Amino acid sequence: MAIKNKKELRRNSIRNRIRKIVRGTAQRPRMSVYRSNKQIYVQLIDDEAGKTLLGVSSRDEEIAGKSVPKIEQAQLVGKLVAEKAKAAGIETVVFDRGGYLYHGRVKSLADAARNGGLKF
């Protein structure tokens, strides 16, 4: 994988350091966050089986139609992932911030998921 710049190299090294420790199981999947400049994506992943259990993004129909700031968009994604996880029978997860700093959109997504009922 070609690294374009120092920021991306730094984020990938932090991401790899986190991934050495954080592992998801079927009972407690890994909640992986990816943040692009415009969108935010989250997946619940079972690392033992190598499967994505569910995924939610700001491009989903429920969220994409609303014109809101990105922090509020992340809160909506966090709320939606908590609802879908509850429906799938998942109550606890392991949070993987993906090498991003825990503030701004990543923090608002995590807080909304906690308020929605996910435990991590």
Image: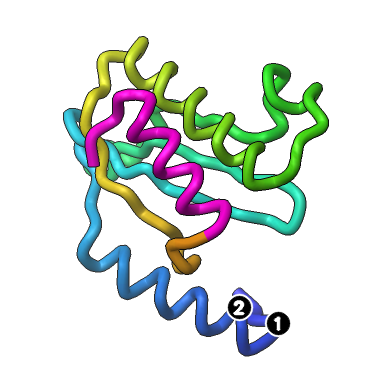
Determine whether 108 is above or below 97 in the image: above
Residue at which label 2 appears: 8
Q: Residue at x 36, y 10 (%)?
A: 87
- Look at the picture and state if 30 lies above or below 19: above
Residue pictured at 30% horizontal, 24% vertical: 117
Answer yes or no: do the residues labelled 1 and 2 have beta carbons within 8 Å?
yes
Q: Please, what is the three-letter code of the amino acid marked with disc 1? A: Lys
Residue at x-position 49% and y-position 61% = 103
Instruction: Provide the residue designation for mark 1.
Output: 4
Q: Amino acid at mark 2?
A: Glu
Q: Looking at the figure, which quarter contains the C terminus? A: top left
The quarter holding residue 61 reads top right
Main SS type for the magenta part? helix
Picture quadrant of residue 58: top right
Q: Nearer the viewer, residue 51 or 114?
A: 114
**In the rendered structure, which segment of residues is drawn in magenta?**
104-120
Q: Element type at marker 1?
A: loop
Residue reaching furthest to the top = 87
Q: Position of residue 53 (x, y in %)?
A: 39, 27
Residue 91 vs residue 43: left or right?
A: left
Q: Quadrant of the N terminus?
A: bottom right
Few, some or many residues within 10 Å of mark 2 (<14, 14–19, 20+): few
Above or below, comparing residue 66 to residue 33 in the picture:
above
* Residue 29 lies in the magenta-colored region: no
Cα separation, mark 1 vs mark 2, equals 7 Å
- At which x and y percent is residue 27? 17, 29
Q: Secondary structure at mark 2?
A: helix
Mark nearer the viewer, 1 or 2: 2
As for residue 110 lying within the magenta part, the answer is yes
